[in-house]
Amino acid sequence: MIFTNFDLIYANMQTGKFSNFVLLIKTNKMAGKIALVTGASRGLGKDSVIALANKGFDIILTYQTKKEAADEVVKVIENLGQKAFSLPLDISSTAGFDQFVNEVKSILDTKFNSAKLDALVNNAGIGINESFETTTEEILDSMTNIHFKGPFFLTQKLLPLLNDGSSIVNTSSGLARFSFAGYSAYGAMKAAVDSLSRYQAVELGSRKIRVNSIAPGAIETDFGGGAVRDSADYNNLISSQTALGRVGLPDDIGSVVAFLCSDLSKWINGQRVEVSGGFRL
Ligand code: NDP
C-alpha cells in the first residue's frame, strides 16, 4: 500500500471476519514520495537526505568525487527503511545533464517503480574566499557555473520529471544578505539563486510546484576548507555575532529542507528562508 501525504491516514483492512475495518494511523510521513538532492555525499546535503528519509521520502542523491561517502549515505537511508540510490553529477558542466537526466529516469523506472520525482534540492556547491580585487574571470565563471547556471539548467531539464505539486529547494547563503570580505563572487551568485527562486515560483505555480531558497548561516562542514569547524577564531567570531550564540551544525539545516519539501510547508512559496540562528540581526 502506498500512503499519501495526510496526517491521518485511513487504511481499509480486509480480514476474514471484519471487512472494511477502518484503521487510523497518525503519521506526518511523505510515503511514496521521491526526492533528488544534489551534493549529498557529505555536509548539508547528507543531513538533508537523512531528514527527508526520516519523513518517508525515497532518495536519489548525487556526489561529484566521493562515491564511497555517497554509498555510505545510501546505506544510512536504507537502514531507515527507505530506498536510496546515488549518481555522479558535476553541476558545473551542463554538457553532462542530458545523460544525468536519462540516468534519473532509468533509476525511477527500475529501482523506484515510478516515473516522477516529488522534490528537488539544489544543494551541491563549494566555498571560496577571494577578494573582489583578485577574483579572476575563471573564479567568477566557476562560481557562476556551480551555484547558478548549473542549478538553473538542471532544474529546467528535470521539469518533465517533476510531479505537479512538487517542491524545489534552492540553496542560497546568509552571505547573500550580509557581507564578509572575500565572498563577492560567491555571495552575488547566492543572491542570484534567491532571485531565480522567486521567478521559478511565479512560473511554476501553474503546476502547483513550490520553489523556495534556504539560506544557511555559517555551518560546520567541509565547506570552504572547513574553516567554520576548524578555525577557533573564525568559529568564535561567528558565534559572537549570532543571537543563539553558536555556529550552525549540519542538523540545523536538513530538518528545514525536509520541512520545505513536505506538505507541512504547503503555503510557503517564493521565499528565502534564512537558517542562521539569528546572525547579524
Ligand atoms: P560540503 O563541502 O560539505 O559538501 C559539498 C557537496 O557538494 C558534496 O556532496 C560534494 O560532492 C558536492 N559538490 C561539490 N562540488 C560539486 C560539483 N561541481 N558538482 C556536483 N557536486 C559537487 O559543503 P556544504 O554541505 O557545507 O554546502 C552545501 C551547500 O550549502 C552549498 O551550496 C553551499 O554553498 C551552501 N552553504 C553552505 C554553508 C556552510 O557554512 N557550510 C553556508 C551557506 C550555504 P563530493 O563529496 O563528491 O565532493
Image (spheres, rainbow, N blue to C red):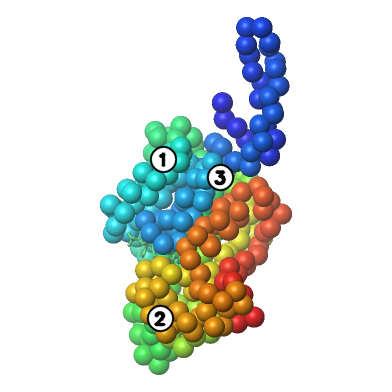
- Comes first in the chain, label 2 or label 3: 3
Q: Nearer the viewer, residue 152 or 190?
A: 190
Q: Quadrant of ligand 1?
A: bottom left
- Comes first in the chain, label 2 or label 1: 1
Say above or below: 156 vs 13.
Answer: below
Would you say 62 lies left or right of 20 here? left
| 2 or 3: mark nearer the eye | 2
Task: Give the residue type at disc 3.
Answer: Lys
Residue at mark 3: 55
Residue at mark 1: 79
Task: Give the residue type at disc 1.
Answer: Asn
> Which element carries disc 2, helix, strand or loop?
helix
- Circle 1 residues within 10 Å: few <14, some 14–19, many ≥20: few
Q: Position of residue 185 (x, y in %)?
A: 45, 81
Q: Nearer the viewer, residue 179 or 227?
A: 227
- Comes first in the chain, label 1 or label 3: 3
Identity of the residue drawn at 46% across and 56% down = 47
Residue 60 visible in this rendered orientation of the protein: yes
**CB atoms of marks 1 and 3 within 8 Å:** no
Ligand 1 under 8 Å from disc 1 Cβ: no
| Residue 135 figure quarter | bottom left
| 1 or 3: mark nearer the eye | 1
| 2 or 1: mark nearer the eye | 2
Ligand 1 under 8 Å from disc 3 Cβ: no
